[in-house]
Amino acid sequence: MQSLAEHDPRQVGPYLLRARLGDDQDAGFLALAPDGSKVTLRVLREGARFIREVEDSLRADPGWMARVLDADVEGSLTYIVSEYGEDQDPAASRELVGPASALARGLAAIHRAGIGEPADVFDWGRVVYLAATGDHATTAPDLSLLPEQLRAPVRAALARKPSARPSAAELLVRLSDGEPAPAPRRFKRTQLPLLAGSAAALTAAVLVVSALPPETAGCVRVAPPPTTPVTTPPPPVDHQSKPRSAFPAEATTPTTRVYYNFSRAKHQARMAELVVEGFRLTSLTLSRGERYTAVWTRAPGPQQRFFTGLSSTATSRFLAESVKQGYRIKLIAGTGSWRRARYSGVMIRQRTPYNLCFWRLTEKQFVARNRAIRARGDHTLRWVNVYGPPGDRRYAAVWEPDEGAQEWTTTVDQSWSTVRRWQRAHPDHRPLTVAASPDRRYTVVWRKAKARTFMYGDAARVRTAPRGYRPVSVQVAGTAARPYFTALWTR
């Protein structure tokens, strides 16, 4: 560690630089985050190879090495911020198998269409090796620190002779322990996005997306996908018998994905794949134990910025900093008692007037805030999430600017039977969004409109919507052993 040089900046974004971490100009800096915690900050040099930037991001990717806490690749001074610390748990590298397989599936889809280079497989090996060990692969890399399932594929991918390297499809076979890999979908050349340096671009999209530690703030930006994104094949099916889950399998259509009760790691891995395929997060629920239920819709749209597992204080800082950079909150979900709650959600880049967002609200505070905003007439309540134990229920909500005058109202903290009675008494109103509390109380935003919707709630099983409807929101109440589902669909 060395003192800052005369030409070194003293502050980058909200981070105060304190020292250099080495002689190399790419080594990075020891910096202080706004909350006073130590972080590692690396300034990205203009013109640096993109794969280098990706590899440095992976060096800080959560679950394997130091976690990525922040990144700004759009400002006048671009940088990546990660955890500061020297010791890492080698066993954590086991979590790398899923993302490594996801990257290989993406490469297989690209190569199947005739796009890509033989060097892509070599770069795959370099990136996976770096993510697992923290070191660049040499001519004789030590593979002992890699999960056993990755050793043979990485060894083959790093072969010095290109002719000795496997194809991306062969990598998938090796990663699935010899089980035939699903065939990637064929694309016409005109259907594929331009992926200059396909391995680097896909690596960035799939692997830089990072889950965040509960004690720190963090974020990632994901560039808007091409209009017609690459679709990767599904992961190999595990045919071994497993205990029957109370939750349904992932629901898949050409334009939607819905999954239930995922762990944070599994949610992050699936999120990375879906972003690459051009999907956008439209609904998110966090159940007890930080289990994720999410709805994704394939559609073009503005840049997304995700946050995961933040404390209330960290969420405040993250949202404030993101707003300065042109992002607006789209949805937010919480779990746990309000003093120890964790929050996840997504922001989007847009130039419209600010969305309004509040969380940790008691029912009384939420009702009062909602009434005041509705009286102003310039925002509509578009997202509500209810979390916390009985007797200490809390609300997180987002109000978006009105697109013309909209007549809307809210029913709060009702049983499902009461919700249905209200709906029958107001046939000219349609649900705009619905929230379920862990103890099966329901809050619904209603809008006077003629739009066709399908809604069910407090159901022990997931139901099938009429043909032609798409999911807008899926909420989970109850417990992991006995969940209750609520969903809203529209045409």
Image: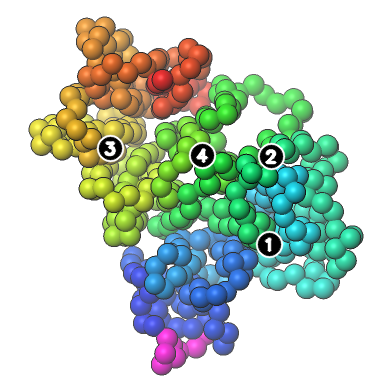
- Of circles 4 and 1, the one toward us is 4
- Can residue 100 be seen in the rendering of this structure? yes
Marker disc for residue 187: 2
Using the numbered discs, state the Cα–Cα distance from disc 4 to disc 3 in whole angstroms. 23 Å
Quadrant of the rendered image containing residue 485: top left
Q: Nearer the viewer, residue 43 or 230?
A: 230
Using the numbered discs, state the Cα–Cα distance from disc 3 to disc 1 in whole angstroms. 39 Å
| Amino acid beneath label 3 | Ala
Q: Residues within 10 Å of mark 3 (few under 14, many from 20)?
A: many
- Of circles 2 and 3, the one toward us is 2
Magenta span: chief secondary structure: loop
Q: Secondary structure at mark 4?
A: strand
44 to 4, vertically: above or below = above
Query: Disc 1 designates what residue?
Result: 127
Q: Secondary structure at mark 2?
A: loop
**Residue at coordinates 10% horizontally, 36% vertically from top-left?**
376
In the rendered image, the residue lying farthest to the bottom is 6
Query: Disc 3 designates what residue?
Result: 397
Using the numbered discs, state the Cα–Cα distance from disc 2 to disc 3 in whole angstroms. 41 Å
| Amino acid beneath label 1 | Val
Highlighted magenta segment, given as a residue range: 1-8
x, y percent for residue 414: 26, 18
Q: Residues within 10 Å of mark 2 (few under 14, many from 20)?
A: some
Q: Nearer the viewer, residue 476 or 52?
A: 52
Task: Looking at the image, tell me whether mark 4 or mark 3 is earlier in sequence order.
Answer: 4
Query: Disc 4 designates what residue?
Result: 279
Task: Looking at the image, tell me whether mark 2 or mark 1 is earlier in sequence order.
Answer: 1
248 to 102, vertically: above or below = above
| Amino acid beneath label 2 | Phe
**Residue at coordinates 71% horizontally, 52% vertically from top-left?**
115
Task: Looking at the image, tell me whether mark 3 or mark 1 is earlier in sequence order.
Answer: 1
198 to 443, vertically: above or below = below
